[in-house]
């Protein structure tokens, strides 16, 4: 065994090639490799010296590190999104969606935005307690908190850690409004909290559906709920009185954009009244990761998809320009936008928006805090 390969076998962050025995090792994962993050001084490449040593490796397992959060509410001032604060119960996401725009955040931890992002996760186990402290601050001004805008709060490890559920319990007790975005039917577990919150005008839930093709969804979003499960979740949420919306996101030109109308039709049949879409975004490391995935899983369409992506981003795979990064630019991006608007109009979507209430907010009282007079 070569010295280079031995070092890589000792370091489980080395990249894995698609196919063969290493393909089995990454079964059920989205990324093809574990490319080094942009801040790392060394880039690793997998090498097989002919002794078939890679067959000795076990399948990639999910590792979770419990980390305390000093503060849990993240602020932003982006003009492209409709909220100024959010909560992320987890860092990294086991769903493994290859297109996830949160992948580059793992580079800040010295980890790969590739396989590390979906296998080396961080759980903020004290999130509920941190949230209580922040909501109890006399200077806190209530506005809707968004959850699920970075990594999914209902990813598989939530079944064990239940961090999202405890956050909802705090928000419900304080009558604080919250908007949730997820790809998981696990959200139905918390209907006993969400339905009463909805009666008080405190919650809305969006599920994103990228494709209705089960084979494509399995390859592209390997550990997220199936498209049918997500649509069923929307139906049950609506039946329970929880306001819902569907996000056709991301729309991938030449791969999933032809499904937009069918997704909207299925969502309307499930009782959805509002919808939105986001064009595929490929910032930083995601560009290379998505290209690898596309070449491995859709080789017959790869060149066309990449060409169409460049046509919507000024000749590049991504442009972060405000006002365009969500919807793109150029004729093809314009056509996608008009198709969405026409389908939404035909189906009666987006006739009104759901405004959550802030006037019911009652700050929690934490241990050792003086009670308020008014």
Image (cartoon, rainbow, N blue to C red):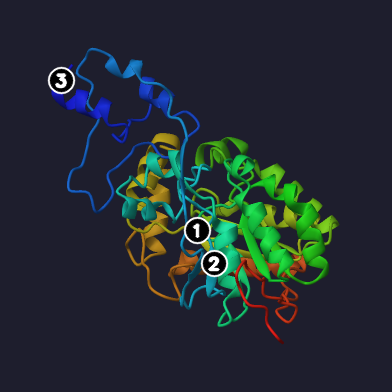
The residue to which callout 1 is attached is: 150
Q: CA distance from mark 1 to mark 3?
A: 40 Å
Most distant residue in the left direction: 3
Q: Disc 1, disc 2: CB below 8 Å? A: yes
Front one among 261 and 161:
161
Residue drawn at x 68%, y 59% is 168
Q: In the structure shown, which secondary structural element does the residue marked by tag 3 occupy?
A: loop
- Report which residue position mark 2 lands on: 86
Tell me residue 342's x, y (percent): 67, 68
Residue assigned mark 3: 2
Q: Residue at x 84, y 57 (%)?
A: 240
- Sequence order check, earlier mark of 2 and 3: 3
Q: How many discs mark residues in the rendered view?
A: 3
Which callout, 2 or 3, points to the residue nearer the camera? 2
Q: Is residue 315 visible in the rendered structure shown here?
A: yes
Whether residue 163 sits left or right of residue 120 in the image: it is right
């Amino acid at each position: 065994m070569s010295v280079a390969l031995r070092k890589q076998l000792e370091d489980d962050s080395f990249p894995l090639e698609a196919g063969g025995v290493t393909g089995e090792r990454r079964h059920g994962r989205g990324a093809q490799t574990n490319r080094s993050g942009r801040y790392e001084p060394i880039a690793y490449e997998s090498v097989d010296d002919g002794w078939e040593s890679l067959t000795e490796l076990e399948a990639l397992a999910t590792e979770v590190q419990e980390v305390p959060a000093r503060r849990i509410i993240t602020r932003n001032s982006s003009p492209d999104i409709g909220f100024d604060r959010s909560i992320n119960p987890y860092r990294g996401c086991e769903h493994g969606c290859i297109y996830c725009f949160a992948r580059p955040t793992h580079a800040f931890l010295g980890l790969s935005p590739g396989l590390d992002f979906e296998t080396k996760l961080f759980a903020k186990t004290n999130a509920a307690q941190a949230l209580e402290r922040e909501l109890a601050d006399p200077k806190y001004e209530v506005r809707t908190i968004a959850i699920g805008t970075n990594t999914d709060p209902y990813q598989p490890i939530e079944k064990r850690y239940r961090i999202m559920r405890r956050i909802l319990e705090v928000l419900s007790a304080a009558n604080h409004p919250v908007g949730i975005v997820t790809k998981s039917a696990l959200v139905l577990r918390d209907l006993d909290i969400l339905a009463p919150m909805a009666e008080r005008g405190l919650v809305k839930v969006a599920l994103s559906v990228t494709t209705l093709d089960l084979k494509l969804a399995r390859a592209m979003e390997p550990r997220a709920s199936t498209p049918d499960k997500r649509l069923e979740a929307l139906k049950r949420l609506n039946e329970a009185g929880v306001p819902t919306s569907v996000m056709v996101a991301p729309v991938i030109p030449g791969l999933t954009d032809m499904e937009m109308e069918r997704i909207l039709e299925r969502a309307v049949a499930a009782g959805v009244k509002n919808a939105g879409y986001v064009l595929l975004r490929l910032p930083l490391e995601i560009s290379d990761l998505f290209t690898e995935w596309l070449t491995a899983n859709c080789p017959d369409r790869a060149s066309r998809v990449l060409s169409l992506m460049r046509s919507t981003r000024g000749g590049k795979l991504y442009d972060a320009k405000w006002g365009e990064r969500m919807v793109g630019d150029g004729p093809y991006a314009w056509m996608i936008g008009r198709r969405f608007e026409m389908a939404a109009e035909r189906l009666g979507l987006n006739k009104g928006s759901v405004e959550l209430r802030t006037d019911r907010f009652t700050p929690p009282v934490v241990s050792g805090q003086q009670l308020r007079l008014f």
